[in-house]
Image (tube, coloured by chain):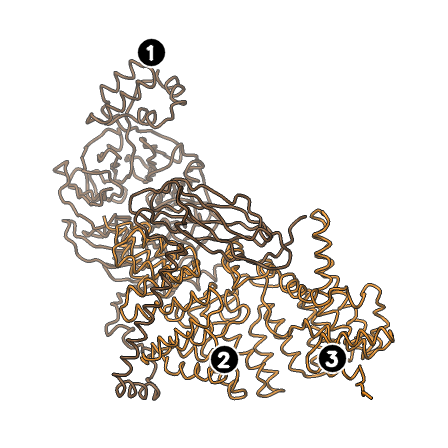
Chain colours: A brown, B orange
């Protein structure tokens, strides 16, 4: 199962800047970049990889910690993780960071890989009308049907949305309503929001191991900044839409900047002084990755583009990518003063960009779904990727590796030099054009005469076909129909499928029947007369019947199909079906 | 006094003049007088054989069973250029489907209809039992049932009073020792008796009420009669101390018919060691083609050409393989080689002609088709092609009169449909939209499954502003011929115009599947993708 490292090395066409440290295609890690982090969890100077594994999406969610190439510990998570960060929550020695996992409306904080604290988002305002209605249900004053009606009217009118329970109730079938009400009516209703993204913000120092606040974005379009020790809400900010991706920089007590990509396709930049967005970047398509490099923001979008913006929202550049973006991450090497953006693409490549220049391409055996770059173990420049198939890949940047900008090659495009394969004009052709030039008048006359004759012949044949309704297409104004027939089978039994379609713009066709004309010595038909249901315009109605060939002489015949209108003797449509030769032999 | 001819000589003379019925009647008389006349017996056997003789060398069509339940293929996905099954459009020299129409399997159509040029290999079982099985291209279930039953019916009619030789009572060992008799007997069993038995069995089968097990037994028996021929061939070979190439070839033929291709290959190879024969090369190449090894087949033909330089059948074989592998330029080279040897070779002339036509040199194609006309080929298809060539070579005075003549020569509805379709094309070319419309309608009258006509009709309807009709026609065309890219592409454009982007996208994707290099489809897809990505 595990492909040899040599193969992987050959496949990566990045000039040997990366060492393949580890590749396990069956690690069973299903996660995204927001749920991966690197942290020195035991304080021994060796970084661990902390992953919030999504499992199958419905079960098997786990918090996994890797050390080197081995899985060090794993503990079960109750719900799907939405984000995971490691942060310092106090000033105790040794400096060991805590891990915060956001899932549902809660943040679970782990210290020393043990559950330490659970923070739940405050509940939202509840619709008073809704509360009254449920109160009445509890007292047995109204039945479920009535409840449904009332809830629906509340949903339509009121500004405050319904609770999850009411919404779930409204979506139920009538027969399961009673049970649902019985089960839930005793509990008070609550309205909870869920966390969509999480980040960290240094409290007051810029130190590497300074205490950090948690910054969380919720489905309710709010941003909260939490105190790291008491887990109280230090600050609350509002956004116009639900946040999906977040980047935070600065210190809470001094000045900070929160860059948030929202579900309405806009990016908002929040600052300390105001609880409303300061700047707004309107994108042309949905963002799928957000990375801040220095003072610039790099965004990957669904239209296969990578765009750069200043922190005030001014667009700097835009480049097109060869494939859709799956994930993005920052590559920051402070020791060498290098900053870049890693972009995972759907065509199994990871591109490294500095500004808009592509520095290197890493080919991967599978599509990468999460990327994390940083210190792992004792190695500073480690790139950790997980793949769509659940693989884990670790690469180490070589100490000697140099990235230099390559500008795209100037000059005319390649297609310009490709010669078109135009056939040479032959001598014959020249001779013929000469003939054409000399006898143009005669040729034209002959052609015009032939054309008139041909028109006549075609018109005659056409009228004949129309008169006997031989065409499989009827263009009459009252019943514009179309039919085609397909014969399936090897014989002696054949399946005859007639696809009838009403091609009118909006009028249905009714009262149609189908009948067949065939040689009764050769064929036997299960039902030689059928009614066609009402034909709705535009849909194809397959009408099926079975034909049995009763002859064993290896001969075949034509079956004629007529589409008739009730009360009219002449058919609307006729189709001739050339039956295939029966290969088998009929029983008895 | 009347001098009567020796009856045996008369019979021989009839045989030479291919009057087999009279020949066999005289032989029957002789045999009534002297039942042990070996010469008469042998002659009668040969006459019966000749009546139903089909050249085994000719490429026979693969049946559905052989195609779908193929066990001999090694790699499911062969490398490009090594298999007949993989239609590859991008391979060097392959024409694009925008210029040259495709058959169902994604191979450009040829200039000469022969078995397996029309439909190729279907991708799925559904395709296999559906589309190619109209009467014009009826594909038998298996090579051994379909064709031989039909041939058998003919031989049954020629010999109503019962079988001439009762095979079950024959002492094959005795006959195999008489070389002169055994050969005719073998050919009789191989070509004639096989079929009679099949058909008589079929009659018994139809008369009784029998369960499914009987069908299995029947198929066993069908094989058994090939086996009887095989048995005789094997015994005769043994008698000739494995030195007679003729018997080895016959053994190979038996094995081939039984589907034992590897054994057949062995026999043919060994026969070639004894005696170089063109026939044997052809048989062996046929085996390799059946095993889907076109490259080996090509090498074999070339090896054969070393021994028989300029042999037309070998050259034609090479050209056919090149054509099937979509390498039209090489195929044309070899067809030209064929013409150097035999300047009346219809297949070669037709193929070169159509190739010139599709490579934008209709004036040269016209020359080739005229040559066919001079040679006495006088049919609807030829006039149809002449008309098209004249039109595209701007010799307008000849165009429509050729089509008229073609219309007067049609023998079936399918041909008539094709001619009307081409007239419709010419009408479109000169802007006669009414005539074109009528022609395409007529095409559909004569052939309900003409996907091209449906497609063109849809375009005309769209010009008139009948969007619903146009859409319906395009959908029909797309379902009738999923291998054509035009209906999918047109449907995609239409859907895009009326704002149904999802349908447009799926149709464009299907168009891309049918013709990956089509630039317009690519652009449309790109445009749609952009549309989907934009907020």
Judged left or right of residue B76, residue A107 is left
Q: Which of marks 1 and 2 is in front?
A: 2
Residue A145, placed above or below residue A32: above
Q: Around disc 2, counting alpha carbons within 10 Å, would you say few (fewer than 14), some (14 to 19), or many (20 or more)?
A: some
Residue drawn at 54 percent across, 68 percent down? B116
Query: In the image, residue A556 lies at what x, y percent?
Result: 57, 58
The earlier-in-sequence mark between 2 and 3 is: 3
Looking at the picture, tell me which residue is in the foreground, A259 or A214: A259
Q: How far apart are marks 3 and 1 (CA)?
A: 100 Å
Pointer 3 residue: B245
Classify residue A272 by image quadrant. Answer: top left
Q: Nearer the viewer, mark 3 or mark 1?
A: 3
User: Label 2 vs label 3: CA separation?
Assistant: 38 Å
Q: Residues within 10 Å of mark 1 (few under 14, many from 20)?
A: few
- Are the two marked residues, 1 and 2, in contact with CB atoms closer than 8 angstroms? no
Image coords of residue A204 (percent x, y): 19, 39
Residue A10, placed above or below residue B246: above
Q: Residues within 10 Å of mark 3 (few under 14, many from 20)?
A: many
Question: Foreground: A142 or B398?
Answer: B398
Question: As displayed, is residue B452 above or below residue A504?
Answer: below
The chain letter for the residue carrying disc 2 is B
Question: Could you confirm whether marks 3 and 1 are on the same chain?
Answer: no
* Residue at figure coordinates x 61%, y 73% from the top left: B286
Nearer-the-camera pick, A406 or A566:
A566
Q: Mark 3 lies on which chain?
A: B
What's the mark number on residue A140? 1
Circle 2 — which element? Answer: loop
Q: Distance between the residues labelled 1 and 2?
A: 95 Å
Q: Which residue, given by chain and number where applicable, does mark 2 sit on?
A: B377
Q: Is residue A374 visible?
A: no
């Amino acid at each position: 199962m595990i492909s040899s490292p040599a193969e992987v090395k050959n496949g990566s066409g990045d000039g040997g800047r990366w060492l393949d440290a580890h590749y396990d295609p069956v690690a069973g890690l299903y996660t995204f970049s927001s749920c991966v982090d690197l942290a020195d969890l035991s304080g021994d100077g060796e970084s661990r990889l902390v992953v919030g594994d999504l499992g199958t999406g419905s079960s098997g969610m786990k918090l996994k910690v890797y050390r080197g190439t081995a899985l060090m510990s794993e503990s079960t998570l109750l719900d799907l993780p939405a984000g995971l960060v490691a942060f310092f929550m106090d000033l105790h020695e040794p400096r060991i960071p805590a891990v915060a996992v956001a899932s549902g409306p809660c943040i679970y904080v782990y210290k020393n890989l043990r559950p330490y604290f659970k923070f739940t988002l405050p509940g939202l305002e509840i619709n008073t009308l809704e509360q009254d209605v449920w109160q009445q249900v509890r007292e047995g004053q109204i039945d479920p049907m009535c409840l449904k009606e009332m809830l629906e009217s509340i949903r339509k009118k009121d500004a405050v949305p319904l609770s999850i329970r009411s919404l779930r109730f409204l979506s139920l079938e009538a027969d399961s309503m009673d049970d649902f009400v019985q089960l839930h009516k005793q509990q008070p209703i609550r309205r909870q929001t869920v966390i969509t993204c999480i980040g960290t913000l240094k409290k007051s120092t810029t130190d590497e191991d300074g205490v950090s606040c948690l910054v969380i974005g919720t489905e309710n379009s709010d941003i909260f900044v939490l105190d790291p020790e008491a887990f109280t809400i230090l600050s609350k900010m509002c956004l116009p839409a639900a946040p999906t991706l977040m980047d935070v920089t600065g210190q809470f007590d001094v000045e900070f900047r929160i860059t948030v990509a929202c579900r309405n396709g806009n990016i908002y930049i929040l600052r300390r002084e105001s609880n409303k967005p300061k700047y707004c970047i309107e994108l042309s398509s949905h963002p799928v990755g957000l990375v801040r490099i220095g003072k610039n923001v790099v965004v990957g979008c669904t239209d296969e583009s990578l765009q750069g913006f200043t922190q005030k929202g001014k667009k700097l550049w835009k480049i097109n990518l060869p494939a859709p973006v799956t994930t993005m991450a920052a590559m920051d090497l402070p020791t060498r003063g290098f900053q870049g953006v890693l972009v995972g693409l759907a065509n199994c490549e990871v591109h490294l960009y500095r500004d808009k220049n592509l520095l290197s391409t890493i080919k991967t055996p599978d599509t990468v779904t999460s990327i994390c770059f940083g210190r792992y173990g004792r190695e500073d420049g480690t790139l950790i990727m997980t793949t769509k198939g659940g693989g884990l890949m670790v690469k180490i940047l070589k100490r000697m590796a140099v990235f230099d900008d390559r500008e795209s090659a100037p000059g005319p495009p390649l297609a310009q030099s490709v010669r078109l394969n135009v056939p040479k004009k032959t001598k014959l052709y020249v001779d013929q054009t000469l003939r054409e030039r000399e006898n143009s008048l005669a040729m034209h006359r002959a052609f015009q005469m032939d054309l008139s004759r041909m028109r006549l012949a075609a018109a005659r044949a056409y009228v004949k076909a129309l008169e006997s309704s031989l065409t499989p297409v009827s263009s009459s104004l009252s019943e514009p129909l179309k039919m085609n027939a397909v014969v399936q089978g090897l014989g002696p039994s054949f399946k005859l499928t007639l696809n009838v379609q009403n091609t009118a713009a909006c009028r249905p066709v009714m009262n149609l029947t189908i009948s067949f004309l065939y040689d009764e010595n050769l064929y036997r038909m299960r039902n030689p007369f059928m009614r066609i249901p009402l034909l709705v315009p535009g849909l194809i109605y397959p009408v099926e019947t079975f034909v049995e060939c009763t002859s064993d002489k290896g001969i075949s015949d034509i079956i004629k199909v007529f589409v008739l209108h009730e009360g009219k003797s002449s058919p609307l449509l006729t189709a001739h079906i050339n039956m295939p030769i029966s290969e088998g032999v009929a029983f008895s | 006094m009347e001098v009567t001819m020796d009856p045996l000589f008369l019979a021989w003379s009839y045989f030479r003049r291919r009057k087999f019925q009279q020949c066999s009647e005289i032989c029957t008389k002789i045999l009534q007088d002297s039942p042990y006349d070996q010469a008469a017996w042998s002659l009668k056997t040969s006459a019966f054989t000749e009546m139903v003789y089909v050249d085994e060398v000719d490429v026979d069509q693969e049946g559905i069973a052989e195609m779908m339940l193929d066990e001999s293929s090694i790699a499911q996905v062969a490398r490009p250029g090594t298999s007949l099954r993989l239609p590859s459009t991008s391979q060097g020299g392959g024409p694009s489907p925008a210029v040259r129409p495709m058959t169902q399997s994604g191979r450009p159509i040829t200039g000469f209809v022969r078995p397996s040029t029309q439909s190729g290999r279907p991708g799925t079982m559904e395709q296999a039992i559906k589309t190619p099985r109209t009467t014009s291209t009826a594909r038998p279930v298996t090579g051994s049932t379909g064709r031989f039953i039909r041939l058998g019916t003919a031989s049954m009619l020629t010999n109503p009073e019962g079988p001439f030789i009762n095979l079950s009572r024959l002492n094959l060992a005795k006959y195999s020792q008489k070389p002169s008799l055994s050969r005719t007997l073998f050919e009789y069993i191989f070509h004639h008796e096989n079929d009679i038995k099949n058909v008589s069995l079929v009659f018994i089968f139809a008369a009784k009420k029998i369960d499914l097990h009987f069908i299995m037994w029947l198929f066993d028996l069908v094989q058994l009669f090939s086996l009887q021929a095989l048995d005789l061939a094997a015994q005769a070979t043994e008698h000739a101390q494995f030195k007679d190439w003729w018997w080895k070839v016959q053994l190979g033929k038996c094995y081939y018919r039984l589907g034992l291709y590897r054994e057949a290959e062995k026999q043919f190879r060994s026969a070639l060691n004894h005696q170089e024969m063109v026939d044997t090369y052809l048989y062996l190449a046929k085996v390799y083609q059946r095993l889907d090894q076109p490259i080996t087949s090509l090498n074999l033909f070339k090896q054969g050409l070393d021994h028989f330089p300029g042999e037309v059948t070998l050259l034609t074989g090479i050209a056919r393989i090149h054509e099937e592998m979509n390498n039209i330029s090489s195929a044309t080279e070899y067809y030209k080689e064929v013409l150097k040897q035999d300047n009346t070779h219809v297949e070669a002339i037709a193929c070169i002609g159509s190739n010139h036509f599709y490579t934008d040199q209709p004036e040269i194609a016209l020359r080739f088709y005229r040559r066919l006309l001079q040679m006495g080929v006088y049919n609807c298809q030829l006039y149809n092609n002449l008309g098209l060539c004249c039109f595209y070579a701007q010799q307008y005075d000849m165009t429509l009169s050729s089509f008229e003549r073609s219309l007067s020569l049609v023998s079936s509805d399918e041909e008539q449909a094709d001619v009307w379709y081409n007239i419709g094309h010419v009408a479109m070319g000169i802007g006669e939209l009414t005539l074109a419309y009528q022609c395409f309608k007529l095409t559909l009258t004569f052939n309900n499954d003409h996907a091209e006509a449906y497609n063109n009709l849809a375009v005309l309807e769209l010009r008139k502003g009948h969007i619903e009709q146009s859409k319906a026609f395009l959908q029909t065309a797309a379902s009738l011929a999923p291998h054509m890219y035009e209906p999918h592409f047109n449907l995609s454009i239409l859907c895009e115009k009326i704002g149904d982007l999802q349908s447009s996208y799926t149709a464009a994707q299907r168009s891309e599947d049918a013709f990956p290099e089509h630039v317009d489809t690519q652009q449309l897809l790109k445009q749609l993708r952009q549309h989907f990505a934009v907020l």
